[in-house]
Amino acid sequence: MSVNLPDESAIIFKVPVAQDKIYIREQQGYYQRLRRTLNILLVALFIGLPWISWQGEQAILFDVGAQTLRFFAWVLYPQDLMVFVLLFSLAAFVLFYVTKKYGRVWCGFSCPQTVWTLLFNWVERRIEGTHHQSRALDNQPWSWKKAGLKSAKHLAWAVIAGLTAMVFMSYFYPAKALYSDVLTWSASALISGWVVFFAACTYINAGWIREKMCLHMCPYSRFQSVMFDAQTKLVTYDVARGEHRGPRKRIAKPRELGDCVDCNLCVQVCPVGIDIRNGLQYECINCGLCVDACNQVMDKFQYARNLISFAALKPGRTVNAALILYGVAIMAMVVGMVVWATNRVDFEVNVARDRQQLYREHYSGLIENTFRISVLNKSNQVADYRVDVSGIQIDQQSQTAIEAVEPGEKRETVITLSGKNTGTNERQHFYITTTNTLSGQTVERDVVFIYPAVEK
């Protein structure tokens, strides 16, 4: 049995949306207000957090050179990697939980790509006019008016991209110094290069790539559908109520038609250019703009709202095992972070034996062992440390204190311990305890004291 296929069937993969530029129509409504409120809050936090001070220092700063992350009173070092593992794991499971319950609402309401894309679209609408006027402008031959409008738009985009890059860099370089150096053209080549790089990324992603980032580059769009089930609330078109679609007058509804008036507003407002009426598509970012557009039309025709809405295929109150497991994982991550924060000490200690000589035998008969102790001060203040020995009889100790260690400083010192030869063991375990004399926190290390070999 042979089947005649169209020429397009020879294509292995065909993207279901148009590859031309998408002219996003502006839309007002509940979900648009919700998103804008949330976006304004997130952008305000993004801009404002680097300007918060704590004890005279920038409260949040990731110092790449020093390999530290300052977060208010805490200074985190590579040795604190566990908290980052817990934090990223927590963020991942929260994302999985939200996706399982509400689909890609992260993409539609909080993703920086969506936020900046819609911001750049807002600027485009203010300068070029409506989406129809913008399309007509692109189709016009070049003129002074067109060149002026395009220049103004791209200049505005470039300014926003530059400011975005400086804000982002202010998390890695002190904000006050960064803005002063960049605006006075006195920044180093390294800082200027990174600002230009991030500005270019923002300009290209939000101004030119736009929805193609969501369609082709974002890995989340590829695997998020495996988390959906019949109880996941997604932006859904009610086929039974809407079909057959077709235009009509407001005063009368033909019997053979459903509620969909085929106005295509749901397509025009979609940031990724899909038609939600074609069913579930991985490109949908659950932004709800099509819901606002459709409800606006339903109000005009005096039809019931939510022809397009956030709805589950099979809504119910049955227990969702996946959500429970995600919730348990989230609680485990939170508990782990609390335990880590409770047990964290503000200094790091490393004890290593002198490799050149395992032991020395003193003329007085005492056996000497030498150890190198390095202390990293992870607090925000100068600290003194006391070194104590326990679990072994020590007759002499060369040093008992490490004083005036600056914040972020790693101090290394050598101590020599001397004890009598017991003549019974070649080695004996004991403990070296380092104490912060100000906070009282202690770090204990298990080490070995080596004696001369026992003759048999």
Image (cartoon, helix red, strand yellow):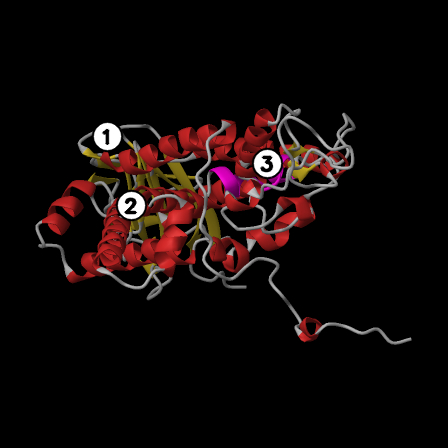
Q: CA distance from mark 1 to mark 2?
A: 41 Å
Camera-near label (3 vs 1) is: 3
10 Å crowding of disc 2: few (<14), some (14-19), many (20+): some
Camera-near label (3 vs 2) is: 2
**From the image, which quarter does the N terminus lie in?**
bottom right
* Residue kind at label 3, given as amino acid type: Val
- Name the residue nearer the viewer: 371 or 89: 89
Secondary structure beneath dot 1 equals: strand
Which residue does the numbered mark 3 point to in the structure image?
98
Q: Earlier in the sequence, mark 3 or mark 2?
A: 3
Which residue does the numbered mark 2 point to in the structure image?
127
Picture residue at 47% right of the left edge, 50% below the top: 428
Position in image of residue 129 (x %, y %): 34, 44
Report if residue 122 is visible in the image: yes
Which residue does the numbered mark 1 point to in the structure image?
54
- Name the residue nearer the viewer: 184 or 394: 184
Q: CA distance from mark 3 to mark 1?
A: 33 Å
Membership of 108 in magenta stretch? yes
Which residues are drawn in magenta? Answer: 95-109
On screen, residue 3 above or below 15: below
On screen, residue 450 above or below 115: below
- Name the residue nearer the viewer: 255 or 89: 255
**383 lies left or right of 325:** left
Q: Earlier in the sequence, mark 3 or mark 1?
A: 1
Is there CB contact under 8 Å for labels 3 and 2? no
Secondary structure beneath dot 2 equals: helix
Membership of 107 in magenta stretch? yes
Picture residue at 60% right of the left edge, 62% below the top: 15
On screen, residue 150 above or below 90: below
* Residue kind at label 2, given as amino acid type: Ile
* Residue kind at label 1, given as amino acid type: Trp
